[in-house]
Amino acid sequence: MMIGSLMLLLAVSLDADPAAEARQAEIDFAAAFAERDVEKFFRFVLDDAHFLGAEETYSGKASIREGWARFFEGDRAPFSWRPERVLVNDEGTLALSTGPIHNPEGALIGYYSSVWQKQPGGEWKVVFDGPGSAVPQPP
């Protein structure tokens, strides 16, 4: 019975698609933000992560929590995002996720970029986030 379970586990892990896993992690990360679930949100952030803001860099989870506290004020998220492109290295251990950022009314306000690292237990965590880019202006 144990050998059968191990073979099933191995078969499932061989079929795993790292890009799909990283995409789902980004979707769940954004959902935690939209749901205003601070604890769930920060479970996706590595302890030694770096978030690059427009004017400053937050290094380490404690600094990120402090810097992002203002984004968790109120019942409505001040912005939302979704992955549009997710690229994973050949080893399936690092991922780059990029996509649009929208304000609460749905207007495009910029683009984000996040680098994710697959942990030994299989979960994906953000190691670098931002600074993203502004919406290109028409000529």
Image (spheres, rainbow, N blue to C red):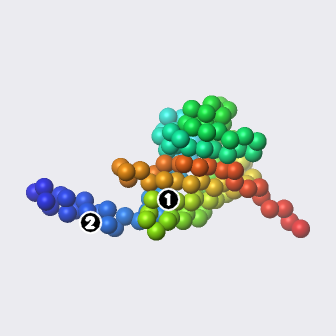
Query: Is 107 displayed left or right of 5 in the figure?
Result: right
- Please tell me in which quadrant of the rendered image residue 68 appears: top right
| Callout 2 secondary element | helix
Select label 1 or label 2 by which is in front.
Answer: 1
What mark, if any, has residue 17 been given in the picture? Answer: none
| Residue type, label 1 | Leu
Please tell me the numbered disc located at residue 11: 2
In this rendering, is residue 109 above or below 65?
A: below
> Does residue 82 appear to the left or right of 39 in the view shown?
right
Rate crowding at label 1 as few (under 14), some (14 to 19) or many (20 or more) other CA atoms within 10 Å: many
Q: Is residue 14 left or right of residue 68?
A: left
Image spot of residue 12 (x, y percent):
29, 63
Q: Quadrant of the C terminus?
A: bottom right
Q: Residue drawn 61% across and 33% down? A: 63
Q: Quadrant of the N terminus?
A: bottom left
| Residue in the picture at 77% in, 55% down | 134
> Helix, strand, or loop for circle 1?
strand
Q: Residue 35 in the image: x percent, y percent?
A: 55, 40
Q: Is residue 54 left or right of residue 72?
A: right
Residue in view at x 14 percent, y 61 percent: 4
Q: Is residue 60 above or below residue 31?
A: above
Residue 37 screen position, x and y as percent? 53, 36
Q: Identify which residue, 113 or 28, lies in the foreground.
A: 113
How packed mark 2 is, by other alpha carbons closer than 10 Å (few <14, some 14-19, many 20 or more), is: few
Q: Which residue is mark 1?
A: 94
Of callouts 1 and 2, the N-terminal one:
2
Going by the numbered disc 2, the residue's amino acid type is: Ala
* In-front residue for pair 50/113: 50
Residue 98 visible somewhere in the drawing: yes
Q: Quadrant of residue 97?
A: bottom right
> Disc 1, disc 2: CB below 8 Å?
no
